[in-house]
Image: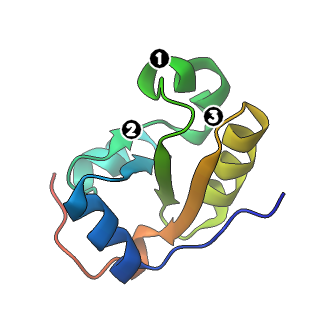
Amino acid sequence: MMIPLIDPAQAIRLLDAGTAQAVDVREPDEYAAGHIPGAVLLPVGQVREKAAALLPDKAARLLVYCRTGRRSAAACKQLQQMGYTAVANLGGILSWPYELES
């Protein structure tokens, strides 16, 4: 199944409306340096172990990102295999033009 790509302009509208959850699949030090406000930290290497606890609603709209887009693509695939039905790849935070929090 194809994983849709979502651009930052679409993503910020969904996040601001409260209809999607940003998911940061980078490492904790990268997350601490700056992340999308409200993003859940779920390092790509821990998706299988921690997704169910951190993201209990498998129908929730998840916008997954990393630094450049490579890890987010892998995490999206894993989440889909685990039964998450509304996963989109936001790609890399390097192309995020909006505010970050640290």
Q: Is 7 on the left-hand or right-hand side of 36?
A: right
Residue 64 screen position, x and y as percent: 51, 55
* Residue at mark 1: 53
Callout 1, which amino acid? Ala
- Secondary structure beneath label 1: helix
Helix, strand or loop at label 2? It is: strand
Q: Which residue is mark 2?
A: 41
- Give the foreground label among 2 and 1: 1
Mark 2 Cα within 10 Å, few/some/many (few <14, many 20+)? some
* Nearer the observer, 87 or 38: 87
State the residue at coordinates (49%, 29%): 57
Alpha carbon distance from label 3 to label 1:
15 Å
- Disc 3: which residue: 45
The residue positioned 65% from the left and 44% from the top of the image is 85
Name the residue type under label 3. Gly
Q: Please report contact status of discs 2 and 1: CB closer than 8 Å, yes or no.
A: no
Which of the 4 quarters of the picture holds residue 45?
Answer: top right
Amino acid found under the numbered disc labelled 2: Leu
Q: How is the image coloured?
A: rainbow
Residue 69 visible in the snapshot: yes
Q: Nearer the viewer, residue 91 or 16?
A: 16
13 shown above or below 28? below
Residue lying at 43% horizontally and 49% vertically, measured from the top left: 24
Quadrant (top left, top right, bottom left, bottom right) of the N terminus: bottom right
Residue at 66% x, 64% y is: 70
Mark 3 vs mark 1: which is more N-terminal? 3
Give how far apart the Cα atoms at labels 2 and 1 are.
Answer: 12 Å
In the rendering, at what x and y percent does residue 7 appear?
46, 79
Nearer the camera: disc 2 or disc 3: 2
Query: SS at mark 3?
Result: helix
